[in-house]
Image (tube, helix red, strand yellow):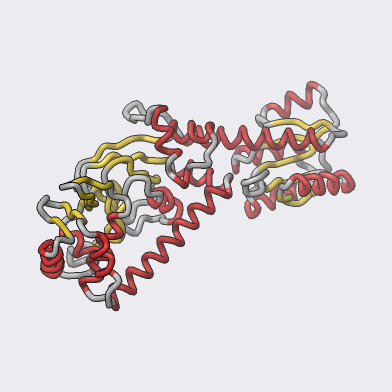
Amino acid sequence: MKNEIPARILVIEDDAFIADDIASCLVELGYTVVGPFASAELAQRSMEESRPDLLLSDIRLQGKMDGIELGQYARSRYNIPVVYLTAHADDATLERAQVTEPYGYVLKPFSEIELRTALKLALARHFQSTLQSHFQEDSQTVHPSPSEVSSFRDVPLLSNLSGQQIGLLLQGSRVERCKAGQILISEGAQEADGLFVKKGRLTFFKGSSSGKEFIVEFLSPSDVFGIAVALAWDPYPVSVRAQVDSEVIWISRAFIAELAAQDSIFAKKIISDIFERLRVSHDVSRGLAHDRAEARVASAILDLAKNSPYGKRDGGSFREVRITRHELAERTGCATETVIRITRALEENSVLDLSRRGRISILDCDALSALATSE
C-alpha cells in the first residue's frame, strides 16, 4: 500500500467474531474499513455516503437480501468491484455469483496472505478497467507514439508513474496541433480535460464586459498547471488560447482523477503546484498594487523567461521570450504605451533586444533582475 491513498473496503459478515477478525486484518494491511455490517440492507444504506472502493461480502447473510444480491446492486448502481467471502463453493452458488462479475473469491477459512492477494488483484483490475472504459477509441484521434514516453517521464508530476500507467496515459491521450490565436477551452466549459504543452505556449485569459482581456497565466512546455487545473477548476473560470503555433497533448480528466485517487505522490505534487501558483499570484497581486511599472515589467519578462531556451549571439548568450508588448501590458496591468516606453529604454541600455516582432530577447539578465527588485 506504499504511496497510495488507503482503499475503503466495505465489509459485510453476519458472524461478529469473523467480522472483527476481517476488520483487524484489513487495518493491518493498510486499508480503511467501512463497517463491518451484519446485513446486506445496512450495508446498502451506507453505500451512498461511504462510496467504498471495494465490497467484501459473505455470500450467505441473514435477512431478505444475500451477498450476491448486494453485489449486483453495488456493481450496477455504483460500479463497485466485489470480492465474495464464502464457505460454500458449490457450482450452483458460484454460477449465481458469476452474474455479478465478481473480481475474486476468498474461501473460508482464509489466511491473511490469501485475503491480501485477492484484494490487491481486485483493486488493480478494477483500476485498469475503469481507466480503459474512459478511453473509447476515436478514429480521428492521433495518439502519441511510444517514443514520447520519455517526454512524459521528464515532467516532474509524471516522473513516478509506472510503465503500465504511462501506457494508459498514452492510450487515453490525444495530440492537437493548433494555430496561434486558436481557442482551446472557453470560459465556463464543463469538465475540461487536462492539457500538457509539448511545443509552443498557451495563455490563460479572462474576458470582461468591456471586451478587454487580462492574461492570468502562461503555459509553457513541461508546465504541469494545465494538468492540475483539470481537477481544480470546474467550470473553467478562464479561457485558454494558443499564443503561438503549438502542439498540445490532451489528457483525460477521468485518468487524472483516478490517478490522483490512487497515487498519493501524484496528488501531493498537484497540491504543491497549486500552492506554488497561489504564492506567485499573491506576489504578482502585491506587485501590481505597490511596485513601480518598471519593476513589474522586468519581473514579468524574467518570469516568462524561466522556461525559455538560451540562444547565442556575438559570442554571448541570451534568452528570448515570445510575447508582444500588448500582451505584456495585459500581464502587468500597465498601459501598452507604458510598456513600450519601458522596453524601449531597456533596449537603448542594451538590456533587451526588440528587433524581432513578437519576441523580447534578454541580453543582460543581471540588469533586468536589479530593475525587478528595485523600489
Extreme-right residue of the structure = 17
Residue 176 placed where, x, y %?
A: 29, 37
* 2 sits left or right of 360 in the view: right
Residue 342 placed where, x, y %?
A: 14, 68
Extreme-front residue of the structure = 315
* 8 sits left or right of 37 in the view: left
Point 76% across, 40% down: residue:
57
Question: Does the image show residue 14?
Answer: no
Question: Does the image show residue 144?
Answer: yes
* 253 sits left or right of 328 in the view: right
Q: Quadrant of the C terminus?
A: bottom left
Work out whether residue 56 or residue 92 is closer to the camera in this orientation and state it: 56
The answer to which image quadrant residue 292 occupies is bottom left
Residue 270 placed where, x, y %?
A: 48, 53
Q: Quadrant of the N terminus?
A: top right
Residue 153 placed where, x, y %?
A: 45, 38
Point 75% across, 31% down: residue:
105
Extreme-top residue of the structure = 91
**Vertical relation: 201 (above or below) 89:** below
**Vertical relation: 57 (above or below) 328:** above
Point 28% across, 60% down: residue:
302
Work out whether residue 228 or residue 137 is closer to the camera in this orientation and state it: 228
The answer to which image quadrant residue 279 occupies is bottom left
Point 41% across, 64% down: residue:
278
Marker count (numbered): 0
Work out whether residue 326 or residue 71 is closer to the camera in this orientation and state it: 326
